[in-house]
Amino acid sequence: MNINALSYNDGVLTLLDQTKLPHATVYRDYTDYETIARAIEEMIVRGAPAIGMTAAYGAVIGARQFTGDAHFTDYMENVIDRLWHTRPTAVNLMWALNRLKPLVRDNPAETIQRLEQAAHDIFKEDAEINRRIGEHLLEVLHDGVTLLTHCNPGALATAAYGTATAPMYLAHERGWNIKVYSDETRPRLQGALTAYELSQAGIDVTTITDSTAATLMQQGKIDAVIVGCDRIAANGDTVNKIGTMPLAICANYYNVPFYVAAPTPSFDISLADGSRIPIEERQSVEVTTLNEQALSIPDVPVYNPAFDITPHKLITGIATEHGIIKANKEAIIQLFEKKEITT
Ligand SMILES: CSC[C@H]1O[C@H](OP(=O)(O)O)[C@H](O)[C@@H]1O
C-alpha cells in the first residue's frame, strides 16, 4: 500500500491534501492543533478512521504546544474540545479522543509521551483492522467477483487497506480477477479518490455516476455492494456518505448482497438507532460549484447533508475485524460483550 493519508514524526503531522487529489499530490506538515482542526473541517483529511487518527495526533501536537501560560489539564481540555467539535458524524473522532483523554496528567512531558503512544497504537490497530475486515469479506466473495462501492472507504480514509476496499486490495494481491464500480459520490466526489487509489494499485475500477448504480444492479452486473460507515447504532442502523441508503434500497430490491465494512471504533452502541446519529450538513457551495465553476442557479437554497441513515434491515452483514455479523441489536451487543470491546 503506497498511499499514506497521514503520518506523524516527532511533533509533525503530515497530511496528504485530499482536496487536491487526484490531479495533484500535495503533502502538508502541521505543528499546530488549530490548523489540524481546520484540516479536518475542510476535508484535507477525511474518512472516519483517518479523522479519528488525525484528531489523536492533533491532541499530541496540542500538548507539545503548551507554553505554561495556563493550567495544563485545563489547556488540554480546550485542545481536545476543539478537535472534538470539528465534524459531528464519524464516531471514530470521538472514540479516539475518548481514548486519549484519560491519559492527560498535570505533567506535560509525561502526558505527551502517553498521548503519542496511544495515537501510534490507534494507527497500528487501524491497519490491522483493515486487513482483518478484508480477510473476513473475502470469505463471502469469490474470484471473478464484481463489486460496487460508494464514496471513499479506502486507504485514503484509513491507515492501510481501507475498510470496504480492503477485500479489493487483498483479492488483487491473491491474484483474483476482480472488478469494481465506484460511485463518483456527489457533491464532494470522493468516489474519484477510490478510482484513483484502486487504479494506482492496478485494480480494474470503473467510475460511474451515482444514478448509474441502480442500472448496473438491474442488469445483474453487481455481485455485491460494500460500503464504509461513519457511525453504526446499537440496532445496526448505519450512517455513511449521502447516497448510501438509496444504494441499499436498490440492492435489496435486486437481491444484491449489501455489506457494511465497519471497524468496531465505528460503532456507537450508546445510541439505540440511527435516528439519534448527528448528520453533518455542509456548505451549499459544495453543491453549487465544482472547481469554482458555478453548477446551478445562484441564490437558490441548497440542502447538503453529508450522510444518510441506512436501516439495518437492508444490510446483509456488517464486516468487522472480528468477523461478519448480522445487522441487528442482538448480534452487535453479543459482539461487544464477547470481545469485551471498550467504546
Ligand atoms: C472508511 S471511511 C468511512 C466513511 O467516511 C467518509 O466520509 P467523509 O468523506 O465525509 O469523511 C465516507 O462516508 C466513508 O464511507
Image (cartoon, helix red, strand yellow):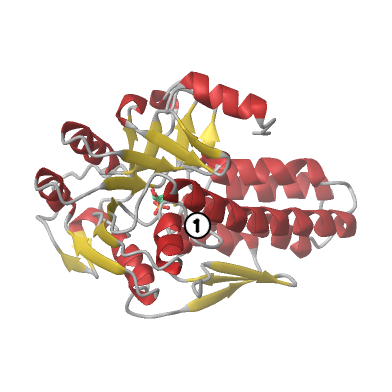
Count residues near mark 1 (Cα–Cα under 10 Å), then give few for <14, some for 14-19, many for 20+. many
According to the picture, the residue beneath numbered tag 1 turns out to be 40
Q: Please give the name of the residue rendered at 46% of the width and 61% of the height, measured from the top-left corner.
A: 170
Going by the numbered disc 1, the residue's amino acid type is Ile
Does residue 65 show up? yes
Residue 78 position (above or below residue 239): below
Q: Please give the name of the residue rendered at 11% of the width and 57% of the height, measured from the top-left corner.
A: 296
- Front position in the image: 103 or 208: 208
Q: Position of residue 109 (x, y in %)?
A: 88, 60
- Front position in the image: 323 or 113: 323
Q: Position of residue 138 (x, y in %)?
A: 43, 51
Left or right: residue 201 compared with residue 128: left
Name which quarter of the figure residue 60 lies in.
Answer: bottom right
Does residue 299 show up? no
Q: Position of residue 297 (x, y in %)?
A: 9, 55
Q: Please give the name of the residue rendered at 40% of the width and 34% of the height, measured from the top-left corner.
A: 317
- Number of numbered callouts drawn: 1
Q: Please give the name of the residue rendered at 23% of the width and 39% of the height, measured from the top-left corner.
A: 256
Name which quarter of the figure residue 278 lies in.
Answer: top left
Q: Position of residue 180 (x, y in %)?
A: 28, 60
Q: Quadrant of the C terminus?
A: top right
Element class at badge 1? helix
Q: Is mark 1 within 8 Å of ligand 1?
A: no
Left or right: residue 340 compared with residue 222: right
